[in-house]
Image: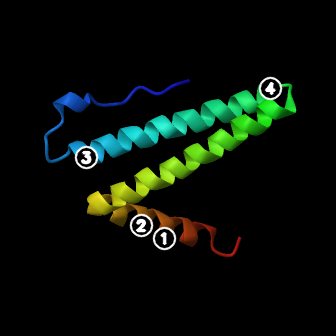
Amino acid sequence: MLSKIPIELQKIKPEDIDREILRAAIIAELDAINLYEEMAALAHHTHIKTVLLDVAHEEKEHVGEFQTLLLQFDEEQTEALEEGKKEVEELTEGT
């Protein structure tokens, strides 16, 4: 269920470390979102479901924070994100 960081951060070149830390943080937050939403779906008590979903929402905000930083520090990522957005718009146009 929980992802392993796909790289060893201590082996990253100093000029790349900040971007890789942000990517690892995004992975951790996405894992947390999946975990909390899965547990909420299984929980019987409404209060537990409510709190788990609220925490999952907060983790989604954290993804946004880390992604915003990543886009500030990685121009290639910014360009790739825009290209991906254009592709989706082209593929889904008129549907």
**Contact? badges 2 and 1 (CB < 8 Å):** yes
Spatial CA span between label 4 and label 2:
39 Å
Element at badge 3?
helix
Q: Which residue is mark 1?
A: 86
- Find residue 18 and name its label: 3
Farthest right residue in view? 45
Q: Residue at x 68, y 75 (%)?
A: 94
- Quarter residue 71 falls in: bottom left
- Quarter residue 91 falls in: bottom right
Up/down of 63 relative to 90, above or below: above
Instruction: Tell me residue 77's x, y (percent).
Output: 33, 58
Q: Residue at x 57, y 48 (%)?
A: 60
Spatial CA span between label 1 and label 4:
39 Å
Q: Which residue type carries mark 2?
A: Glu
**Contact? badges 4 and 2 (CB < 8 Å):** no
Spatial CA span between label 2 and label 1:
5 Å
Q: Which residue type carries mark 3?
A: Asp
Element at badge 1?
helix
For the residues carrying marks 4 and 2, which lies nearer the camera in this image?
Answer: 4
For residue 3, side relative to residue 15 (left or right)? right
Chain-order first, disc 3 or disc 2: 3
Q: Which residue is mark 2?
A: 83
**Contact? badges 1 and 3 (CB < 8 Å):** no
Q: Which residue type carries mark 1?
A: Lys
For residue 48, side relative to residue 59 (left or right)? right
For residue 28, side relative to residue 24 (left or right)? right
Quarter of the picture holding the N terminus:
top right
Spatial CA span between label 3 and label 2:
23 Å
For the residues carrying marks 3 and 2, which lies nearer the camera in this image?
Answer: 3
Quarter of the picture holding the C terminus:
bottom right
Q: Which residue is mark 4?
A: 43
